[in-house]
Image (tube, rainbow, N blue to C red):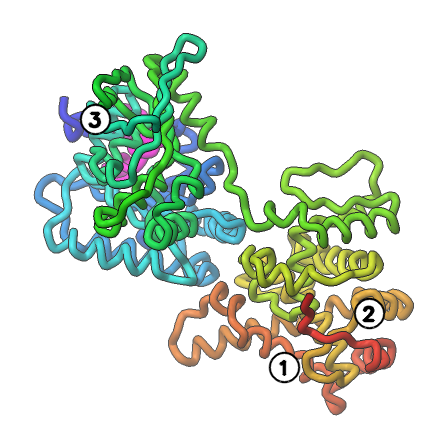
Amino acid sequence: MNIYDQIKHDIAQEYYQNNYSNDGQRFVAWYLRNIYGLNTAIAKSCITDGAGDKQIDAVYINEQEQTIYIVQGKFVQKGKLDSKPLMEIHSAWLQLKDPQHLQENANDALAGKVNAISQCLDEGYDICFELITNSELSKQAQKDLEIYRREFEDCDTLNASLKVLDINSLNTLYNEFLNKRSNINHDFTLEQGRYMEVNVSGKKAVIAVISLRECLNIPGIQDGSLFRKNVRQSLGKGLKVNKEIADSLRNNPREFFFLNNGITAICSSINIHDGVMSAKDMSVVNGCQSLTTIFNNGESLRNSEGGYIVFRFYEIAENEKADMISTSTNTQNRVSARDLCSNDKHVLAIKRDYEHCYTDGQFITKRGETHEAGKNPLHIIDLGILGKLLLSWYLQKPTGVNDETKIFGKESFKQLFHRQYTPEKIQALNEIYMAILKVWETKDNPLEFNDTLFARKKRALFFHVFAVSALFCVVNKSQDNTIPPPDIALTLMKDGGILDEVVQVSGDCVNEACMSAADEAKEKDEIFDILKWLKSASAITAVRSEIRKAFRPHKQDDTIADLKEKLKMSKRDFEPVHIGS
């Protein structure tokens, strides 16, 4: 039975007929069950198709891959697909840039998923749009596909990948789901002294250093069939790690061997004879992003010499063991800029001083480090959070809190951390942050933040931190490029009993700045892009402007007048914004 007949046969079954109203929905549900392996309940919960679906038929969030899949299905009776489905996906992509507007106009099934999508994007999840069809794209649609792909991948505000899974791709993926092997065989040319054959636990393995040019000849990279047992396929040129791999390949191919973790492949058999290794039924289970990026930079690599990558080939016959290897090799997290800074001497000095001052406290420097039993929750701070606080308060740049390079990049890290912070300053920032976090984490939104802003709380709350520091600057008419020391600021707020009032007033100013920007976009008949706004310098300027408005003499009520009096600080206490080594 061919794949088209298989799909028709399957969706005629009782489950699909009883749970979905048309063949389009049934086709998407079939895809979720037979390609992603979801159970019946989860597959049904992913479906958003119907009136008000905004060209989004299903949303599947894969926590393990940290990827959001937006699925559009086209089940057709005959003929090839034109560009219309791609235009619909483009429309869905545009609408996701304004999640509040999308949620307000979507059907119930989709509206319920918009918040989850926004939260996952804030946490750094990738987003992949998939067009699935039991047909094929027309020639014009194939050309348009490349145009849309570039637009998705090059966008700064909603970077995404776009894949089309036609009838041939579905056939390959369905066979993989049934644990049928794709017949990918390849002969590798091995260089003397650059490979090693070993036997571990009765299994043959070959460790080989393979030239980058040799990688260009491996079949199954372009159509993805080589990665049938990998936990995910290529996520596109726009993925940050793939951009970094491409930069290394183009600028320093000779050093690529030392900069890349390499490739893991499983095979049904491996045989070496006269410097040639024959790999049968090969599947790459780790290294998909590396190999696809190598393939996409093939023209520059064909003319270069000396570039290599390490391969680990395992001769594995059992499907269960192969699946275990695929899962295990892909659950290792990439070392981030923050990880590399966790043992820096300046960070360790802050940790030593803080924990010496607050003996019941803990300064967490490494990802995955847990809270020690018996420590005071009020005296626990994380290096990642501290970096965002320093960026927002000391550098007045809350726009960069979701970009690790703005905090832990070489120059940024030097500017932020190559100075001594007293434990009191660190703890003051921590307490101000916790007071602000409390209002953002409360589900009933006590400060009545704009819904779009509230949905982006992981970014927006650091604008709130910045606003507190800016409020002190406005009240005390400090010089430009100076900021209040957080320990003195916190003492004034606590002694005056006005910490909650300051949090509310500064939060109101952030909210007003956001709503003004949204109104301005509406007047111009433009879509307000909250993410773009939170990354812009204009947002910082707007928040400062709203604070100045709130403290204008002729507009002050009793609360503002009281705050102004209790927040007075000596201008000599203010510190410079730009702090260096």
Q: Marks 3 and 2, how far apart in space? A: 67 Å
Residue linked to disc 1? 545
Specify few, some or many for label 1: CA neighbours under 10 Å numbering under 14, 14-19, or 20 or more. Answer: some
Specify the amino acid type for callout 2.
Answer: Ala
First along the sequence among labels 3 and 1: 3
Mark nearest the camera among 3 and 1 is 3
Relative depth, front residue between 533 and 449: 533
- For the view shown, which residue lies furthest in the bottom direction? 554
Question: Can you tell which quarter of the image residue 507 is in?
Answer: bottom right
**Principal SS element in the magenta part?**
helix
Identify the element where label 3 is drawn.
strand
Q: Marks 3 and 1, how far apart in space? A: 64 Å
Residue numbers of the magenta segment: 10-36
Relative depth, front residue between 276 and 319: 276
Q: Position of residue 385 (x, y in %)?
A: 67, 53
The image quadrant where one finds the C terminus is bottom right
Would you say 351 lies left or right of 195 here? Answer: right
First along the sequence among labels 1 and 2: 2
Residue linked to disc 2? 489
First along the sequence among labels 3 and 2: 3
- Residue at position x 54%, y 47% from top? 336
Specify few, some or many for label 3: CA neighbours under 10 Å numbering under 14, 14-19, or 20 or more. Answer: some
Q: Position of residue 416 (x, y in %)?
A: 67, 63
- Residue at position x 43%, y 80% from top? 523
Q: Is residue 354 magenta?
A: no
